[in-house]
Image (cartoon, rainbow, N blue to C red):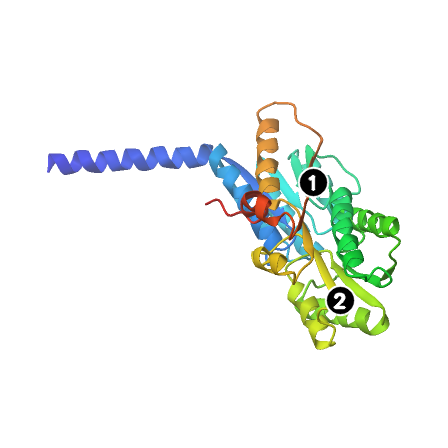
Amino acid sequence: MKFLRVLFGLLLLMTALLSNENLNKKQLAYIVSDMSIPFWQIMSSGVKSSAESLGYEVAIYSSNNDSKTEIENTVKALKNKVDGIIVSPTNSLACVTILRLAKNASIPVVISDIGTDGGEYVSYISSNNLEGAYDIGKVLTKAMINKNLQDGKVGIIAIPQQRANGKARTAGFMKALDEAGIKSADIKQQVTFSYEETYEYSKELINNYPDLKAIWLQGSDKYKGALDAIKDSGKKNEILLITFDAELEFLDLIPKGILVGSAMQQPYLMGQESVKVMDLHLNGKEVQKNIQLPILAVSSENIEEMLPIIRKNVLGIEK
């Protein structure tokens, strides 16, 4: 009986110690554009990975690509008195409001991707969208010239151009086209980021531009919409598709030539770095205001040698 009382007392003590440990853990909030998109899922995994290793608890708030929900999520995080916020905003303009609310609550913010049109923040972790888009543009122009398609036009299905990263992607890509003397067709801006939208935009480009020879999709997860539109239009093997970011299937599609290539950001690494920077700041250390990570211009020529980096930093596959 005495043994049971001692054992019970030890269990109570351990429970109390664990509770105090959890109470003492610093809290972070990750406010993310849309967790239904694989890119953000991978970045979220990177955030959670670093948070766990550095002893933080992190709450994930998905804004479902809606600015109203995003503000509601920000208010929730602030009411929970988190120690820091990491944000991947729906767009650069919306980020200004988030930063203002956080400043009023004296909560530091690290921005991971997308960017902001103004406001105060600790650090901005981004990809070099301008250079990455330029590099993947060169991959496409090389492929078009090799296939004697350089007299045709290139259509663009873009992320919103009010985003800082969207503007940079378009500018870098257009520079590559201009240098090769290849003309662009129309640019369609995504709103819903759905399969249906990608399919319809691709069909419109194909129907409106008989000399269309390539489509650049400034995202990755709805690539099937573009491929299906090309196939349904009877243009398979006549219109090239190149993308931005990556899906696991790309490890198979790029070597087969179904995709010419993709400019792959490193979302897992970006998520990890965002938490590391926040941790430095919360511990009174000086941090870089702007940190740009390289984008990998992946094609059939280099995918095999880049595979280890792609699997971990791009797709978030640790093992």
- For image coordinates 52% across by 43% down, the residue present is 48
Which quadrant of the figure contains the C terminus?
top left
Q: Which residue is mark 2?
A: 239
Q: Which residue is mark 1?
A: 126
Q: Secondary structure at mark 2?
A: loop
Percent coordinates x, y for residue 266 in the rendering: 62, 44
Mark 1 or mark 2: whose residue is earlier in sequence: 1
Compared to 182, does 88 lie above or below? above
Compared to 163, does 249 lie above or below? below
Q: Residues within 10 Å of mark 2 (few under 14, many from 20)?
A: many
Q: How many marks?
A: 2
Q: Is residue 293 left or right of residue 158?
A: left
Q: Is residue 64 left or right of residue 139?
A: left
Percent coordinates x, y for residue 292 in the rendering: 70, 36
Compared to 10, does 44 lie above or below? below
What is the residue that sits farthest to the top in this orientation?
285
- For image coordinates 74% across by 34% down, the residue present is 120
Amino acid type at image mark 1: Ser
Q: Nearer the viewer, residue 256 or 133?
A: 256
Q: Nearer the viewer, mark 1 or mark 2?
A: 2
- For image coordinates 80% across by 53% down, the residue present is 161
Q: Is residue 214 left or right of residue 291?
A: right
- Distance from the alpha carbon under mark 1 to that under mark 2: 31 Å
Amino acid type at image mark 2: Ile
Q: Residues within 10 Å of mark 1 (few under 14, many from 20)?
A: many
Percent coordinates x, y for residue 110 in the rendering: 66, 37
Which quadrant of the figure has residue 111? top right
